[in-house]
Image (cartoon, rainbow, N blue to C red):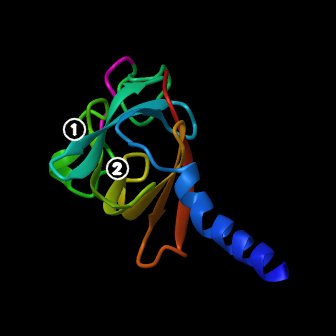
Amino acid sequence: MKAISVSLLLLLITVAPCLAGGGDIAGSWLNQDKDARIEISQCGQKYCGKIVWLREPNYPVGSKEGTPGTPKVDHNNPDVNLRKTPVLGMEIMHDFEPEKDGFWTNGKIYDPKSGKTYSGKITMVSPNELRLRGYVGISLIGRTEVWTRAN
């Protein structure tokens, strides 16, 4: 009887992540701060995402980053030639490959707030929640954000 209980527990631990995730990450997602909406779509066999909405698409009055009332641009980009690129419409995710049900790996995530690009992986926790892990080198050195599906 104990062996059956242990076997069922091990099966549940193995299968639960697949049951929780699954599905398709394509669609509209709000970032963790809920100040941007990212549209994730299939780009060939991989997935990419671009910013389609910003709570504040223009620089506010008193901004030191840009002229108040003008669209926010990618002023932290390490490539000087890209610093005038508007943030709205910018692709910030690319090359995510479906690895197994509920997991996408080998992608890149760009953070326009810092101008840094990170390796990334995505876990679909539920049909309405993603966990994005951005990291440098190994996944242990990084940060996770939770995104929610936009209505």
Residue 76's disc is 2
Rendering quarter of residue 73: top left
- Of 65 and 55, nearer the camera is 55
Q: Which residue is at a point 56% across and 41% down the rendered structure image? A: 32
* Residues tagged 2 and 1 counted as in contact (Cβ below 8 A): no
User: How far across and down, in percent of the image, does residue 39 sit?
Assistant: 34, 33
Is residue 139 shown above or below 45?
below
Tell me if 70 is positioned left or right of 138 in this view.
left
- Decide: few, some or many residues near mark 1? Use Cα within 10 Å; few <14, some 14-19, many ≥20: some
In the picture of the structure, the residue carrying the numbered disc 1 is 84
Is residue 27 shown above or below 61?
below
Can I make out residue 145 in this image?
no
Residue 3 located within the stretch drawn in magenta: no
For the record, the magenta segment spans 69-73
Query: What kind of element bears circle 1?
Result: loop
Which mark is first along the chain, 1 or 2?
A: 2
Rendering quarter of residue 33: top right
- Of 15 and 139, nearer the camera is 15
Amino acid type, residue under disc 1 in the picture: Lys
